[in-house]
Amino acid sequence: MLGGFLAAIYALPFAVGMMSGNVYYDLQWLNDLVTVMMSGMMQGGVYAMFAVGLTLIFGVMRVINVAHGEFVVLGAYLTYAAFNTPAFLGISAYVDPLVSMVLTLPIAFVIGYTVQKVLLNAVVGGPELTPLLITFGLGISMINIIEWIFSTDYHTIPYYPDSFQITESIALGKNKVISFMMALFITASVFLFLKYHRLGKAIRATSQNAEVAMVCGINIYRVYLITFGLASALACAGGTLVSIQFGFNPETGLTYTVIAFAIIVLGGRGHYVGAFIAALMLGILENLVSFLVPNGTAMVEMASYGTMIFVLLIRPRGLMGPKID
Amino acid sequence: MESRETTRNLSYLGVLCVVLLIVPDQVNVYYRSFIMFTMMYVVLALSWNIISGYTGYLSFGHVLFYGVGSYASAILVADYGWNWIPTLLVAAAVGIGVAIVLGYPVLRLKGPYFAIATLGAAESFRILATVWDDVTHGGEGISLPNVENSFSTYYAMMILMIVTILVSYWIAHSRFGVRLNAIREDEVAAAANGINTTLYKMIAFVLSAVFCSMAGAIQANKTLYIDPDTEFFILVTITMKLMAMLGGKGTVIGPILGAVVLYSIQEVVWVAVPQAHLIAFGVFLILVARFMPRGIVGFFVDRGWARKGMVH
């Protein structure tokens, strides 16, 4: 059922492309297609990173953080600020975005930690819609604070604009490849942290059963704080990697919230490997849509949204979620 | 007792009606518009309340009905030369259609999933309005023929508001409303007691869509210019949600009170500091969700300052 559905959803952009004459059957077009799919996969790697953050929050606290996309945008703006600081001080140099992560990730961690401490710790375990409203309000405030400081203009960070030539006619932007590698590295470190570190084990224990974890001597409120901080740092890292590839403005956050949510729905709630695979799939699908469908760049958001709705209806547990909900 | 209370409440509504009928001739255009927009937000808050307050399905994308209604009306007026009053009916019909098509899949989702799905739906409609430029004029928006309409839109909005209040009141006091509340409290138990939950949720969703889209249509004819970014602006959803929650969701008087209070505050603050008012909205939403989940009305009832029957 799911396989058929996924085949259908991937066939759809091709069908639309054929009808509107965007599909050609020559070598050039095939090369373009491969390029598009590969860059989609690279993009998916970045999505995976912040989607894992959202999965983490959901898995541990059963809270859906609607402000997650805003944390991504926050990361992009922190990077932007760091990038331009030397120029602002009159030095003709730029801070490398990847280097600036050393600074921005701890900042995002502290912000996430504080948010959890001040706003969310008191409502975890209560009615499930209260945290939703709280994070929604938080998101709105964040968007407008960023707008206040940086205005609503689109910003970009120029970063390795040239590309790797893979074959004669397939080329990938260096910034995409670098972001993908970085995203893989960070995601893998988080997996290892969750798997082997003491604190990672405590986080997993809390997400499996908070009460039993508490009985075993885990301070679950501390785990909540660290989880939210970690997830915010992941979102922030996602923001850095987004900022060196795409333009961003304060209101793009909503898009990333929907994308991250679509990924955790498709991957299976609270399932990290599922989220990773789903992110790659969604990245490819998005790029196919923007490549094949006329007016596709505007329709990209529909890809994640449509996938989410249909997965929720057809197979609510997603690719790899637990059988019983 | 019950009927006495109904009579009393209806007479309050009658007094309000008379006051609103007299007022527009006495004041200038600014105040007339101000009252008209306050009434619009009363309609929006009440309509959000029908699906989210009574039924407990928190919609995060109600602006889409507002936007769809305003587009339906504006297209007919600008491109087909209709008089604007009949277009309100078309807007209502379009709102019903969208609610049915959207509600059929989306109302099966629960809690947070419903919320995110509606949020995404509103975004999709905004994109659709931008992309489908043969019909919607795309990103450049639609300008309507310029006419003096502060009286006609005022009365139209007034009638719509009275109807919305009456329908909300009827829902709160009928078996239908009791069933919606049962769905909110425990959907499985409600279904086990023989309530066709899918049907009732759908009716509630459609009802709330109708008023929203008609309010959007009147607004489009008042402001005479619409574009995708303002008509499908997420802030409209937030505003109606915040108003209903501030007043007290699940009651009739709550959203009305919330809309009047919040819109008045907004009008004052907006002029002074445009950016800060949006930040304050977010903070306000957090505070209300955290400390006053049942709103002003709930706050009063809990302290015994108002009887429970009065607030319905």
Image (spheres, coloured by chain):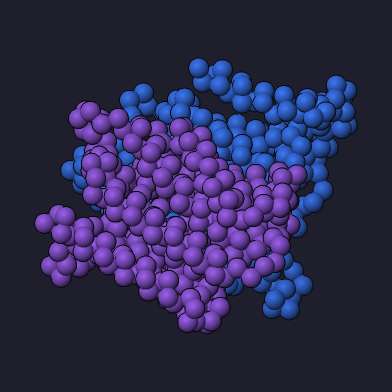
**What residue is shown at x 67% (from left), y 23% (from top)?**
A11
In this rendered view, identify the residue nearer to me: A219 or A207.
A207
Residue A11 in sight from this viewpoint: yes
Q: Total marks drawn?
A: 0
Report the quarter where the C terminus of chain B lies. Answer: bottom left
In this rendered view, identify the residue nearer to me: A189 or A231.
A231
The image shows residue B96, relative to residue A223, as above or below, that is above
**Residue A198 x, y percent position in the rendering:** 34, 44
Q: Is residue B212 left or right of residue A172?
A: left
**What residue is shown at x 42% (from left), y 75% (from top)?**
B22
Q: Is residue B44 left or right of residue A16?
A: left
**What residue is shown at x 61% (from left), y 36% (from top)?**
A303
Q: Is residue B56 left or right of residue B283?
A: left
**Residue A52 x, y percent position in the rendering:** 48, 42
Report the quarter where the N terminus of chain B lies. Answer: bottom left
In this rendered view, identify the residue nearer to me: A150 or A80.
A150
**Residue A113 x, y percent position in the rendering:** 39, 59
**Residue A289 x, y percent position in the rendering:** 69, 35
Place residue A104 in its image quadrant. bottom right
**What residue is shown at x 55% (from left), y 33% (from top)?**
A307
Residue B286 in sight from this viewpoint: no
- Indicate the colour of chain B: purple
The image shows residue A165, relative to residue A140, as above or below, that is above
Place residue A112 in its image quadrant. bottom left
In this rendered view, identify the residue nearer to me: B12 or A78.
B12
Q: Which chain is blue?
A: A
Place residue B201 in its image quadrant. top left
